[in-house]
Image: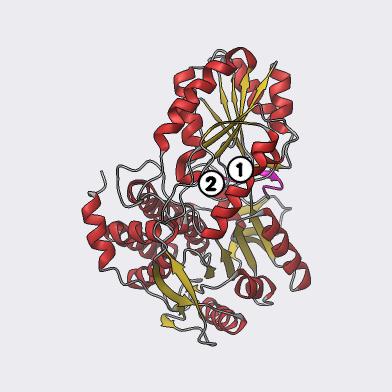
Amino acid sequence: MPPPHEHWLRLAARLMPHTDAYIDGAFTPAASGATLPSHNPATGDLLAEVAACGPTDIDAAVRAARRAFDAGAWSRAKPAERKTVLLHLADLIDEHREELALLDSLDMGRLVSDTYDIDVPFAASLFRWYGEALDKLYGEIAPTGIGDLALVDRVPLGVIGAVVPWNFPLDLATWKLAPALAAGNSVVLKPAEQSPLSALRLAELAAEAGLPDGVLNVVPGYGDPAGKALGLHPDVDSVAFTGSTEVGKLFLRYAAESNLKQVWPECGGKSPNLVFADADLNAAAEAACAGIFANQGEVCSANSRLLVAREIHEELLARVVATAKDYAPGDPLDPASRMGALVDEAHTQRVLDYIDIGRREARLVCGGSRIDGAGCFVEPTVFDDVPPEARIAREEIFGPVLCVTPFDSEDDAIALANDSGYGLAASVWTSDLSRSLRVSRALRVGTVSVNTVDALSAQTPFGGFGQSGYGRDLSLHALEKYTGRKTTWIKH
């Protein structure tokens, strides 16, 4: 259980976050002296003025990362040595759980009960998981003829650029950092300009854990110029990106215009949630709301399309609307709140614009308004009878907006679900095991959650198809993308 509201308010009053970039083991202001504001979206208050890094800072960070990689203190360290550091870092994340949870909640409006109970513990567990995994990976001996020995090793790529979004600042940074560092790479991390504070603190904790200078660098800044400079840099070997499909395409272009670096995009989604007539309707309604209203709908894999068998459409809709009303937004620092604030004013207006579009395309049955007063709060919103060609059914809103569409058959449900440029995730609700397997196999998505929503773990890969990108985070598969296969052929 998280501490009470008053405890968080006291901690917030005396919080002093780092605001400079972290390059080569030291905090340093942007070379230009420029800063960017970090606001609390729940109140509009200014939290800090953070270094707004540009190409000069990116170049300094990449050069530091390359020096560290070439020096070999980390890249050529024994697996057991890297393991010790990552396990120590996991312990430090646990020790600073309240501080890290507070930083993310204040920075982007996520409920502190979720950052405290879910995000920080998961970040620590990932460093622990990859730390434990890295000394259990073996190379290969290829089958060859007599007198030949072919060894196939996995070697670190070198300098990794990691670009992460604002919706889960600490966790999504960890999704990139833990496997990249475990594999022996150096990393230049660019957090989103809306939420840089926890990444800067994480870099300091990594140094305390024993990570050598230059191995992890954090350069806050705007996408253009900082992210662009990282994508174009000729000495970056790979970019791991999570964010919008539009920006993911930019990084592919940057790679083509520079050194053909590997790019691993994990982009947007418009995930369907299919509910068949034999499902547990109470559980399905609860999960449907959790799948779109958790984190204010600011989740790439949010179940934003609810596809319902026509014979249970009205009954399930009534349960969803009743449950949605329990998600009234409130102070993110109050553990009693069910939804927090959207990340900033610009994104709030974007979500409200989509709600206005939805009023013309479908039937509004719940919510649809901004909460009066200070802060970026929008009601949980449900549209019914949403045509599959509607913009709100096809475009990623990234907010607490649920689109409900009835279907008439299993084939109809699958066709509706797959009628999307995205392919990140889906959910299926049924008590028929054969149907669950049949439908899951027919859905063109990276993860299907059956009788639950948005299932993930350190053990399973996360990523999608189509315009959701082809990057994969989590699991041992994530280690593969941060390494390259190297063959050593010996004639004897």
Which image quadrant is residue 67 in? bottom right
Furthest residue in direction front, as rendered: 372
Labels in figure, total: 2
The reply to whether residue 245 is in sight is yes
In depth, the one of 8 and 425 nearer the eye is 8
Please name the amino acid that badge 1 sits on.
Answer: Ile
* Residue 424 place in picture, x, y as percent: 63, 42
- In front: 281, or 66? 281
Residue bearing mark 1:
355
**Magenta span includes 189:** no
Examine the residues drawn in magenta and state their main secondary structure: loop
The answer to whether 217 appears left or right of 222 in the picture is left
Quadrant housing the C terminus: bottom right
Could you say whether the residue bearing mark 1 is in a helix, strand or loop? helix
Residue at 53% x, 76% y is 69
Separation of marks 1 and 2 at Cα, in angstroms: 17 Å
Q: Which residue is mark 2?
A: 299
Magenta residues?
A: 461-468
Is residue 463 magenta-colored? yes
Looking at the picture, how far across and down is residue 66, in whole percent? 57, 79
One can see residue 491 in this view = no
